[in-house]
Amino acid sequence: MFDCKRQLAALLLAEALLAPLATTKTSLAAERLVPSAELRKIFPGRFQAHVKGYDVRFIASRNGQLKGYYGGFSDTGRWSLRGNRLCIMLRDWLDGKTTCSPVRRTRGWYLARGIRFRRM
């Protein structure tokens, strides 16, 4: 049972992070692309995230380390900023693959490839 829950959590997180950023003309009007200067102000930090209806907490350290917590599960990896794109790698939840995405802001939340997050 433990392995099934862990695998489900990993699959849902990976699907959300690797899915293309869905936008429509309506959603683009309410969202704005976050410039790199603003991203550098919020990273590193502690974040509350919503991924496919699940609450996940992330801690992005100054040295580029990333830790994710979901229920009793956790994962580690790396984060970086490349221009106005947020890049993350998680060992288990993303199978060690790095994914980069532009970040948008809407209604107090940041959006990047299927994940919605804000600073804690």
Image: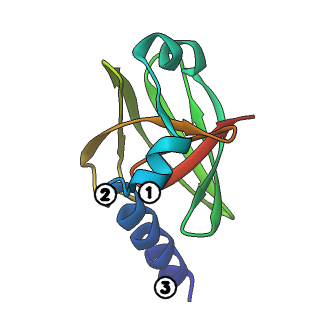
Tags 1 and 3 touching, CB below 8 Å? no
State the image quarter where residue 35 is shown.
top left
Q: In what element is the residue under mark 1? A: loop
- Which is more foreground, mark 1 or mark 3? 1
Q: Is residue 50 above or below residue 2?
A: above
Question: Few, some or many C-alpha atoms within 10 Å of disc 2 (few <14, some 14-19, many ≥20)?
Answer: some
Q: Mark 2 is on which residue type?
A: Leu
- Which is more foreground, mark 2 or mark 1? 1
Q: Mark 3 is on which residue type?
A: Cys
Q: Quadrant of the C terminus?
A: top right
Task: Look at mark 2 in the image and give the residue it sits on.
Answer: 18
**Spot occupied by residue 64 in the image (x, y as percentages of width and height):** 43, 23
In the image, 119 versus 38, the foreground residue is: 38
Task: Look at mark 3 in the image and give the residue it sits on.
Answer: 4
Q: Residue at x 32, y 61 (%)?
A: 19
Tags 2 and 1 touching, CB below 8 Å? yes
**Spot occupied by residue 38 in the image (x, y as percentages of width and height):** 52, 15
Tags 2 and 3 touching, CB below 8 Å? no
Q: Mark 1 is on which residue type?
A: Gly
Task: Give the distance between the C-alpha atoms of the residues marked 1 and 3, in whole angstroms.
Answer: 22 Å
Residue 114 badge: 1
Q: Quadrant of the N terminus?
A: bottom right
Q: In what element is the residue under mark 2? A: helix
Q: Is residue 91 above or below residue 5?
A: above
